[in-house]
Amino acid sequence: MNNSPLISIITVSYNAVKTIEDTITSVLNQTYSNIEYIIIDGASTDGTLEVIKKYQDDISIIVSEPDKGIYDAMNKGIERANGELIGIINADDWYEANAVERTVEIYLKGEKKFDVLYGDMLYILLNGKTQKIIPPREVEGLRKKMIIGFASMFIAKKAYEKWGVYDTSFKISGDYDLVLRFYTKGAVFKKMDFIAANFRQGGISTELSMRLLRENMRLRRKNKINFTNLEELYIFANFNLRKKIKKILFKLGLLPKRYTI
């Protein structure tokens, strides 16, 4: 490919010995060659490092040290990245073989104007079955929830430099916070019509919990996105307001029983 920009791929890992080899080989076997591969490991103790060392000659940067969480590890990778585009593929997931090449083609055809490129994604369920996730072309839905598959995203380094990296105060929803922040600041998004990555169910972001809901509400308030319905408002309401909202939600049949005052 003419005018082949450097692309940085970051993998963050912690005790991922069972899956990280799939991730590593999916990067090293890309049909696009101008790749800088960075692995940020959180001082794994289960054999993950031994797997990484098998491929160390083909990995640009390997860091293994304690971190303050997954988004801190991602920031370490971004800080070290030199590529025009940065993809982050975690140690449970893997790329399709031509994901980087096809992304670069679209990026160059767009005259490098895109800040966030994102594709389709296969979601691998715990029972082994797969679901194809096809995000919408229009990204207004980000006002309500994370609609882009994280593993399928490639983000321009200039976007990180302009709007910042991951907010480490989030433990589950830092990716949503970053994408929503970029959206509200005017980033240019581009939907790519191909499967870019495969995502295994079971990571921290797939654990639907009150903590996840609270983080999602906090990041939307942080990014000045209004609550869209009473159920969302209920999650953050104080005790007295919750009692009033709860009565309304129960009458409407909108409040799950697991929510308590």
Image (cartoon, rainbow, N blue to C red):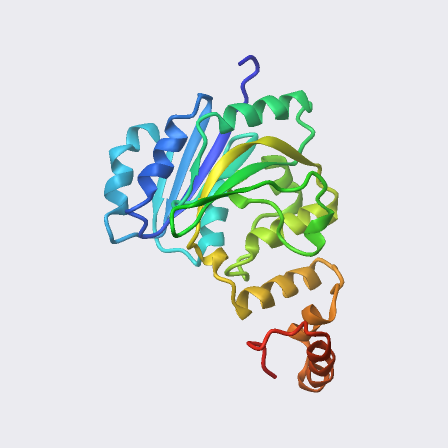
Which one is in front, 149 or 176? 149
75 shown above or below 116: below
Q: Looking at the image, how many numbered discs can be counted on the residues?
A: 0
Horizontal relation, residue 48 to residue 254: left or right: left
105 lies above or below 203: above
Identity of the residue drawn at 67% across and 32% down: 114
Q: Nearer the viewer, residue 170 or 62?
A: 170
Q: Quadrant of residue 252?
A: bottom right
* 222 relative to 255, above or below: above
Q: Position of residue 99 (x, y in %)?
A: 50, 29
Residue found at the far top of this picture: 2
What residue sits 71% from the left and 54% below the top?
143
Measured as percent of width and height from the top left, residue 242 is found at 69, 82
Please report the residue visible at 37 percent of the width from the left and 28 percent of the height from the top.
28
Q: Is residue 75 visible?
A: yes
Identify the residue shown where x is 65% and y is 35%: 191
Q: Is residue 62 left or right of residue 212?
A: left
Q: Position of residue 44 (x, y in %)?
A: 29, 52
Q: Nearer the viewer, residue 222 or 216?
A: 216
Q: Is residue 154 visible?
A: no
The quarter of the picture where the C terminus appears is bottom right
Q: Position of residue 13 (x, y in %)?
A: 37, 48
Q: Nearer the viewer, residue 168 or 48?
A: 48
